[in-house]
Image (cartoon, grey):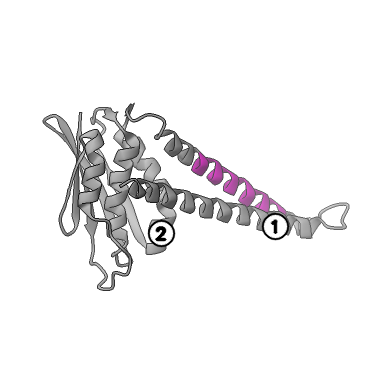
Amino acid sequence: MIERPLAFVGKIIADFTHEINNHLALIKESAGLISDICKGKKSIDKKEMPYVIESLEAIENQINKSVNFINYFNRFAHRMDNLKSSFKLNSAIEELFELLKRYSNRKKVSLKYDLPSSLPDIENSPFILEFAIFYAVDSFLKKSKPDTNIIVTANKENGFIRLTVKYEGEFTENITQEIWQISAVQEILLLTNIKITSNDKTVNIEIPI
């Protein structure tokens, strides 16, 4: 049973390292251009200055993106510090979707969420909840067609928050990757009293409050 959450963490780490490598490659490319322009020169020609400024701006932009991405990953890592903690649902989904952006972009699927601002804080395991949301998103992405959407909504009901993950679009007919059995995910979620059910294009997650 433990291999499911470990696979989830492995996927996040793999995408994180790929994304950071992409950021560093762009920084290296921009720095290389500046080096080529400045090599062997005591001063920079006016006509070359726009290229230098453009490269410096590209470096700054990539560094800012990297810092933001690392902050999301740092938050994700600390979600595993305790089995239970108080957290905002919006914050957990935001960081998960940022870390999954490379995966969804590769599949050409848009990840969206629209949550009411009035939702209460949750006292539970943010890591287990993110695992449940990942299961839902991953199940759709593995059989998705390009230019489709996965949309997350939520509403408060009696004693729990109902989180709905909905796929909008058609599925591919050729599914080559394994999709986890929902029964295995349900067994893991029993640790936190979170419930999950699914049908063709919708996954519902009930979070006690």
Q: Magenta span has 8?
A: no
At 33% from the left and 27% from the top, the residue drawn is: 85
Q: Position of residue 109 (x, y in %)?
A: 34, 60
- Judge whether residue 149 can be spotted in this image: no
User: Relative to the observer, which residue lies in front, 208 or 156?
Assistant: 208
Q: Where is residue 193 in the image (x, y as percent from the top left)?
A: 20, 35
Extent of the magenta region: 51-70
Q: Residue 51 carries which label?
A: 1
| Residue 105 visible, this orientation | yes
Mark 2 Cα-neighbour bin, 10 Å: few <14, some 14–19, many ≥20: few
Q: Where is residue 9 in the image (x, y as percent from the top left)?
A: 41, 46
Report, in whole angstroms, how far the alpha carbon at label 1 lies from the one at label 2.
Answer: 29 Å
What number of labels is visible?
Answer: 2
Q: What residue type is labelled 1?
A: Tyr
**Residue holding disc 2:** 105
Work out whether 174 lies above or below 158. Answer: below
Q: Which of 134 and 5 is in front in this view?
A: 5
Going 46% across and 40% down the picture, which residue do you hit? 72
